[in-house]
Structure formats: structure tokens, C-alpha cells
């Protein structure tokens, strides 16, 4: 099963590029940019990655991002992630970036986007990996700051496909961002949002109703609301679930308690994703492996996660058909 999982064609829909910053690259960039880190070794970094909840992770994650200064740093970060994609047979990825984490420190919006975009373009030509970039607003900041970020995105619109919402969910419900999401939709962006990760199922319903989102990031708390669950099934509203993240951040005590396979078998459009792989112990294949070890599944069920991700992606229909055919062939011959 391990080989089947490693080679299975995959589509990733929930990864924060800042969350792919491995300690090795963090140290390299700190040295290059003359930044002092609060860690003396890789072992010390990894020791610090013991989280109690989402907030305890976010504090360290935003600190790590301080080493990213120049366009080349954002390029190197993204290129390293794409190489992980290649190793895991990820054919398409839709990745988040948090511009406010960088603009708040005085880094220009264009520096961030151009570095990421240059690596994504090289990913297409040299690795055959397609991608779409999603700009996330930080929900612990106010809506005025989100509007200012949307304004900064205007000159880089050709590089950004959709708008998302991340950071601390508790105390920052979807309704806080209704105005800016309405404006983003008017400008032609698709929308997604983190909801029902640590926060209640009502955040999922509100994100669907108020922010007009095309899919829900995390959404595992949907099981608390039977009517919502039924709606997700009948309308095939996708969830981008991040299993290793949910264990590291104690959304579930252990993988055996995770509801992803129950949701799959209920007919939800659930997908497997890595979220912040450098912090949570693994990339796409590691997430598939961890789920399948705790919840034995058939090859057809494992492959359904890829079919769901293709369906939930923002890829054009003809390309979706190509990926579906390729995935079906993989299942039939392995
Ligand atoms: N930013 C990076 N990872 C996140 C997560 N799992 N939830 C909310 N915001 C995030
Ligand atoms: Zn996330």
C-alpha cells in the first residue's frame, strides 16, 4: 500500500506556502539575510514544534516567516515545495500565501507574489506541475486591513486566482469579512475560507452563506450539525481536510479518532492535504499514509480522495477530464 500511495496521482488544495518552510531553509535564509533565530539547532526547532492548539502553532509560524525578505527567498521556498510535490506525484496544487504576514514587516506585496509566481511558472515548464495561487486574509486583523490588501492585489491580479481566510478562527467569525469578500467576488475572484477547524459548525454555514465560498478549508466540525452535513453531501461542497495538521493541533486526539474516512463513506467531497507540512510532520504522501494506517481502506477509496480533489479544484473542465483519466488508469493498473 505504501508504494501505491507514494505513486498515486495527487492534487493538493490546502497548503500554506509559509508552512512549507523547513528548518534547514529557515537557517539558510536567516544566515543569508543576517537574521538571528531564537533556535541554535534543527533539533531545537523541532522541539519547539509541540503545539497545544492552533494559536500556539501560529505564534511560531509567523515568527518563522521573518526570514523571508527578498523575492529570491520566496522563490526558493516555493521551489523547494514544488520538488516535494514532484516526489509525491502531486500533479496540481492550489496554494495559499499570507501577504499581510510580510507587508506588516515592510516587505512589498509584489516581492512576495513575484517570487512565488516565478517558481510556480518554472514548476509548470520544468516539472509539469500546474498551480493556482490563493491570497489569504489574516482573520485576526481587521476588515480594513483586508481591504488594503485586496487593493494591493490589483496590480498582480494575473497571478492570483482566489481569495481565502486563515489564521485564528476562534473570536474571528466569517461575518467579520463579509464586505471584503463581497468586493473580491465583484472583482472576479473565487473564494474559500478556513472554517470548522477549531471553530463551530456555524462558521461553516456562515462562510458558505456570507462569503460565498466554493469550498471549505478543514470543515471537520461539520458533523456537529446534521442539517449542514446533509447539505454538504447533496450539494457536493468540498472540504479540504488536513489530517496530520488536525492531530498536531489537537483537533482530534489521535488519527484513529479522525472523521475523514467516515465523511468519505457518507459521500462527502473530502480531500487530503498537508496544510503546513514543515510544521506538522509531512507532505501529501505522509498524510495519505497516516490516514490509511489508522483507517484501512481499499485502493479505490484511497483513489477517491484524488477524484474528489480534481472535482473540487479550480482547474478547467478539459484538464479535469485528463487528470481523471490518468488517475483511473493508475487505479486499474496498480
Ligand atoms: N495558517 C496556516 N495554517 C493554518 C491553519 N491550520 N489554520 C488557520 N490558519 C492557518
Ligand atoms: Zn490551513
Image (cartoon, grey):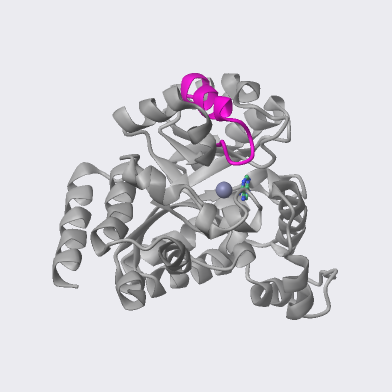
* Relative height, residue 334 to residue 52 (above, below): below
Question: Residue 205 in magenta?
Answer: yes
Q: Check residue 138 for magenta coloring.
A: no
Q: Which of 94 and 146 is in front in this view?
A: 94
In the rendered image, the quadrant that contains the C terminus is: bottom left
Q: Quadrant of the N terminus?
A: bottom left
Q: Where is residue 216 in the image (x, y as percent from the top left)?
A: 47, 37
x, y percent for residue 60: 76, 58
Residue 3 visible at all: yes
Q: Is residue 227 above or below residue 322?
A: above
Q: Is residue 52 left or right of residue 206?
A: right
Q: Which residue is drawn at 51% across and 53% down?
A: 242
Give x and y (percent) for residue 120: 44, 60
Residue 132 visible: no
- Indicate left or right for 82 with 195 as reference: left
Task: Tell me if 4 is positioned left or right of 162 in this view.
Answer: left
Magenta stretch?
193-212
Q: How many labels does the image show?
A: 0
Q: Taking 158 as reference, is 86 above or below it? A: below
- Displayed quadrant of residue 5: bottom left
Q: Where is residue 170 in the image (x, y as percent from the top left)?
A: 70, 34
Q: Residue at x 82, y 69 (%)?
A: 35
Amino acid at each position: 500500500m505504501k508504494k501505491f500511495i507514494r505513486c498515486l496521482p495527487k492534487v493538493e488544495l490546502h497548503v500554506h506556502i509559509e508552512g512549507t518552510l523547513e528548518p534547514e531553509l529557515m537557517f539558510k535564509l536567516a544566515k543569508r539575510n543576517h537574521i538571528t533565530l531564537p533556535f541554535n539547532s534543527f533539533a531545537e526547532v523541532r522541539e519547539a514544534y509541540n503545539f497545544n492548539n492552533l494559536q500556539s502553532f501560529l505564534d511560531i509560524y509567523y515568527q518563522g516567516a521573518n526570514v523571508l525578505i527578498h523575492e529570491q527567498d520566496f522563490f526558493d521556498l516555493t521551489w523547494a515545495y514544488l520538488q516535494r510535490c514532484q516526489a509525491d506525484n502531486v500533479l496540481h496544487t492550489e496554494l495559499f500565501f499570507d501577504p499581510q504576514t510580510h507587508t506588516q514587516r515592510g516587505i512589498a506585496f509584489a516581492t512576495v507574489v513575484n517570487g512565488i509566481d516565478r517558481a510556480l511558472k518554472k514548476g509548470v515548464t520544468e516539472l509539469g506541475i500546474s498551480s493556482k495561487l490563493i491570497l489569504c486574509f489574516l482573520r485576526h486583523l481587521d476588515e480594513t486591513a483586508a481591504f488594503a490588501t485586496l487593493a494591493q492585489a490589483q496590480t498582480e491580479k494575473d497571478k492570483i486566482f482566489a481569495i481565502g481566510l486563515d489564521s485564528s478562527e476562534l473570536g474571528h467569525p466569517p461575518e467579520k469579512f463579509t464586505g471584503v469578500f463581497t468586493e473580491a467576488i465583484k472583482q472576479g475572484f473565487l473564494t474559500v475560507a478556513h472554517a470548522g477547524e477549531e471553530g463551530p459548525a456555524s462558521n461553516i454555514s456562515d462562510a458558505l452563506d456570507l462569503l460565498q465560498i466554493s469550498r471549505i478549508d478543514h470543515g471537520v466540525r461539520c458533523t456537529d450539525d446534521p442539517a449542514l452535513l446533509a447539505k454538504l453531501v447533496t450539494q457536493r461542497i468540498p472540504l479540504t481536510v488536513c489530517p496530520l495538521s488536525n492531530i498536531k493541533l489537537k483537533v482530534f486526539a489521535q488519527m484513529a479518532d479522525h472523521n475523514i474516512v467516515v465523511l468519505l463513506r457518507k459521500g462527502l467531497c473530502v480531500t487530503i492535504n498537508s496544510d503546513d507540512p514543515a510544521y506538522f510532520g509531512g507532505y501529501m504522501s505522509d498524510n495519505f499514509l497516516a490516514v490509511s494506517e489508522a483507517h484501512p481502506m481499499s485502493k479505490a477509496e484511497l483513489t477517491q480522495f484524488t477524484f474528489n480533489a480534481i472535482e473540487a479544484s479550480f482547474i478547467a473542465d478539459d484538464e479535469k477530464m485528463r487528470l481523471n483519466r490518468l488517475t483511473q488508469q493508475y487505479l486499474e493498473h496498480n
